[in-house]
Image (cartoon, rainbow, N blue to C red):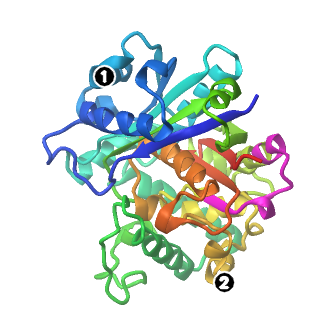
Amino acid sequence: MTVFVLGGAQTDFARNVTKEGRGILELFAEVVPAALADAGVSAADVEVAHVGNLAAELFTGQAQLGGVLVAAVPELDGVPSTRHEAACASGSTAVLAACADLEAGRYDLALVVGVELMRNTDGQRAAEHLGSAAWAGHEAVSAKFAWPALFAEVADAYDARYGLDPGHLGLFAEHAFARAARNPLAQARDWRFPDGAFGSDDALNPVIEGRLRKQDCGRITDGAAAVLLASPTFAGRLGGGFPRIAGFGHRTAHIGLAEKLAAGGEYLFPHLHGAVADAYRRAGLPGPDALDVVELHDCFTITGLVALEHLGAAPPGDGGRFIAGGGLDAAGINPGGGLIGLGHPVGATGVRMLLDAARQVTGTAGETQVDGARTALTLNVGGSFTTVVTMIVQASA
């Protein structure tokens, strides 16, 4: 059964919610009514809710987010809800659970909310909280910043296999920030960079961990995103014409990065390539040439480079040349800035990707619109490529 995206909303990812005197409850209270209004439905229509979040317990001390959702939007009292955690793919797993509810015929309208509040502490403490999604006690144990250290290991593995030009990573970051500059909700939309900021100057672009520098890394972000998903029956009552989730892929590998890298094969991460292949197959698409837009997970520049090869935009080992040749724009990759430029409130990212993909294929993406977009792919990664969720979103025929 097809699932339709009726509409949704995203908060401004540039905000520091704690400095505003607000918290997770207020993020729910802001994004859910906006999403309902965009979809043209009321809270009374919602039959089930799913929440994506990584680490609210660590950042805020708050669990039981389904109850916080009801506290923020009292009209949802009595609606069943579940919270989902899969590191940076938490939002996408919440979407898949909502789709399963609709496809099973249990409900006809589902609300999915992704939320993360991370700027209420210093960068070191935030890095420690986020490190809980790595293999605790087994990897990155001596690193100051766990995730930059682990993805620097990914860069080392890529370099050992294919060779890695750091200039290509700089070009990826430069593209992300340039696209974010035209996105009114992007965290980095007002950021400006001096000449040399994307190169190897230690003063302008300092090393964070290993071979990864400051501009290679996504930033700590506060934010929320929400979408309303509907069955064909419910969407038909509203007149139809909504974008649809045409296919998906979802695979999970060993939590340890070293164990994943030891898998071997044509691709650095075979399960990542497999999840994308699953989505193409389920959507009936031949491959990447059928895509107009890609919302690509780029928590680090190396993540983006590896991911674009695994979705088939470039052959293994050719991602850097693809970037240098202008392939990111030609393939419609991250027109809104991606995680590096737009921001990465962890639990919200997968939901935000779906919302942006739906807007692209309906021609409602504003300044970030890719002309003529009809088919989009989202690729959301949790951990060191541990959990992979990808979705194909298409305009209605």
Per the image, the residue denoted by label 2 is 325
Q: Give the residue displayed 39% in from the left and 72% down from the top.
A: 181
* Nearest to the observer: residue 278 or residue 273: 278
Q: Circle 1 — which element?
A: helix
Q: Residue furthest top?
A: 78
Residue 213 in picture, x, y percent from top left: 40, 71
Q: Circle 2 — which element?
A: loop
Kind of residue indicated by mark 1: Val
Residue 343 in picture, x, y percent from top left: 39, 56
Vertical placement of residue 285 versus 341, above or below:
above
Residue 258 in picture, x, y percent from top left: 60, 48
Magenta-colored span = 279-294
Q: Residues within 10 Å of mark 2 (few under 14, many from 20)?
A: few
Per the image, the residue denoted by label 1 is 68
Is residue 138 visible in the rendered structure shown here? no
Kind of residue indicated by mark 2: Gly
Q: Give the residue displayed 72% in from the left and 74% down from the top.
A: 318
Earlier-in-chain disc, 2 versus 1? 1
* Nearest to the observer: residue 211 or residue 293: 293
Q: Give the residue displayed 63% in from the left and 25% down from the top.
A: 234
Vertical placement of residue 5 versus 51, above or below:
below
Q: Tell me the distance, in whole angstroms, between the alpha carbons under discs 2 and 1.
A: 47 Å
* Nearest to the observer: residue 67 or residue 167: 67
